Amino acid sequence: MDTIITGIGQRIHEMRLRREWTLEELAQKTNCTPGFLSQLENGKVAPSITTLYAIAEALGIKITDFFPETIHPPKVVRKGERQTFRIEGSSVIYSPLMDRLPRAILQSFILTLLPPNQGLQYDEERAHFGEEFYYVLSGVLRVRIENTFYDLFTGDSIYFHSSYRHRLLNPTEHHTVVLCMITPAIF
């Protein structure tokens, strides 16, 4: 069958397995038979729009998530095309590594943290829904999470839930460069 139908079936299969659901469990949530869902996952039948809506609702996704390549082609950002920005007074320079897809949940940056004398000494402390990952490419990154400080050096990384109050600092007189991945996307 068509590669789009095969792709839809594969995505349904992957999402079902991520949730650790059997075909029978998904069938109960969608009013489909396990046999039909098996054929769909294997690209042997094409679903109706109504069926796709029911499956998407059961999986907690949007129907367009079944068509990522068709609706949202991959986005490439070349090194020389990357835009950087700095929020006035901030000691952080942001360099996005990716153009956002609609409804994107992940965003990545190269962050350059200036020495304390080149911007506000501290960016604001914040807590929000999501997760954050930082990998130090060069320099020293001090991460405050609640009341604990973590000093990270070149090659070190940290991963945490953003619901904890946190702040990034550069405690040195040199630039600190960090790879950052954050969910949900913030810009």
Image: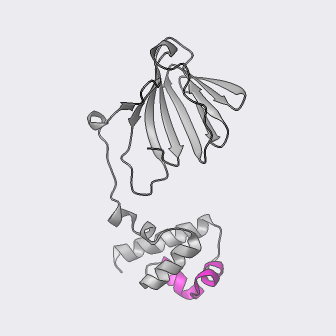
Q: Quadrant of residue 67?
A: bottom left
Picture quarter with the N terminus = bottom left
Would you place residue 53 above or below residue 103 in this image? below
Q: Position of residue 77 (x, y in %)?
A: 31, 43
* Image location of residue 114, percent across then percent down: 46, 19
Residue at the outermost right position: 147
Colour scheme shown: one colour
Q: Closer to the camera, 56 or 91?
A: 91
- Name the residue rendered at 41%, 74% in the picture: 6
Write the start and end of the magenta stretch as one range. 24-41
Identified at 59% across, 87% down, the residue is 31
Query: Left or right: where does residue 180 sit relative to residue 157?
Result: left
Residue closest to the far left: 80
Residue 149, picture quadrant: top right
Residue that appears at 57% across and 30% down: 124
Pinpoint residue 25: horizontal percent, then vertical percent. Answer: 65, 79
Query: Does the magenta portion include 36?
Result: yes
- Compared with 23, 136 (above or below) is above
Whether residue 133 appears in magenta in the rendering, the answer is no
Residue 33, quarter of picture:
bottom right
| Quarter placement of the C terminus | top left
